[in-house]
């Protein structure tokens, strides 16, 4: 099953995140099927960029959002 979840990027104490579509059993930083956006919590206000059309596509073919990704999509 495909999940839409966050993966960490950046360095120690300077974390940024990517919103990705990935197989459920893969590691947190494993190879993604597709990068769907990013989230930078370090700037004020936090920077969020999401390809909503691609997220809608993945949801239509059965992908599931993780709780963190669901919160990010509401922002």
Image: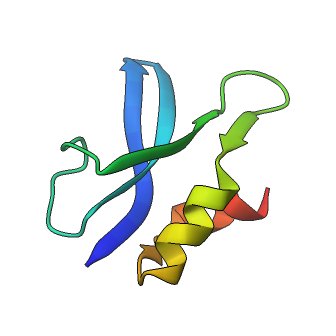
Residue at the spot x=46%, y=19% of the render?
Answer: 13
- Taking 47 as reference, is 4 left or right? left
- Taking 32 as reference, is 41 left or right? right
> Residue 12 at what x, y percent from top left?
37, 17
Query: Is the residue 58 above or below the residue 9 in the image?
Result: below
- Taking 15 as reference, is 43 left or right? right
Residue 16 in view of the camera: yes
Residue at the spot x=69%, y=61% of the render?
Answer: 73
The residue lying toward the viewer, choosing from 36 and 73, is: 36
Query: Is the residue 64 above or below the residue 70 in the image?
Result: below
Residue at the spot x=41%, y=19% of the render?
Answer: 10
Residue 25, located in which quarter of the rendered image? bottom left
Residue 55, located in which quarter of the rendered image? bottom right
Q: Quadrant of the N terminus?
A: bottom left
Residue 72 in view of the camera: no
The residue lying toward the viewer, choosing from 26 and 55, is: 55
> Residue 20 at what x, y percent from top left?
42, 50
Q: Quadrant of the C terminus?
A: bottom right
Residue at the spot x=38%, y=36% of the render?
Answer: 8
> Residue 66 at what x, y percent from top left?
46, 70
- Taking 26 as reference, is 47 left or right? right
């Amino acid at each position: 099953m495909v999940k839409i979840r966050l993966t960490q990027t950046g360095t120690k104490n300077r974390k940024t995140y990517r919103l990705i579509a990935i197989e459920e059993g893969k590691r947190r930083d494993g190879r993604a099927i597709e990068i769907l956006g990013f989230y930078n919590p370090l700037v004020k206000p936090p920077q969020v960029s999401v390809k909503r059309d691609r997220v809608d596509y993945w949801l239509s073919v059965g992908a599931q959002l993780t709780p963190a990704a669901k919160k990010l999509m509401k922002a």
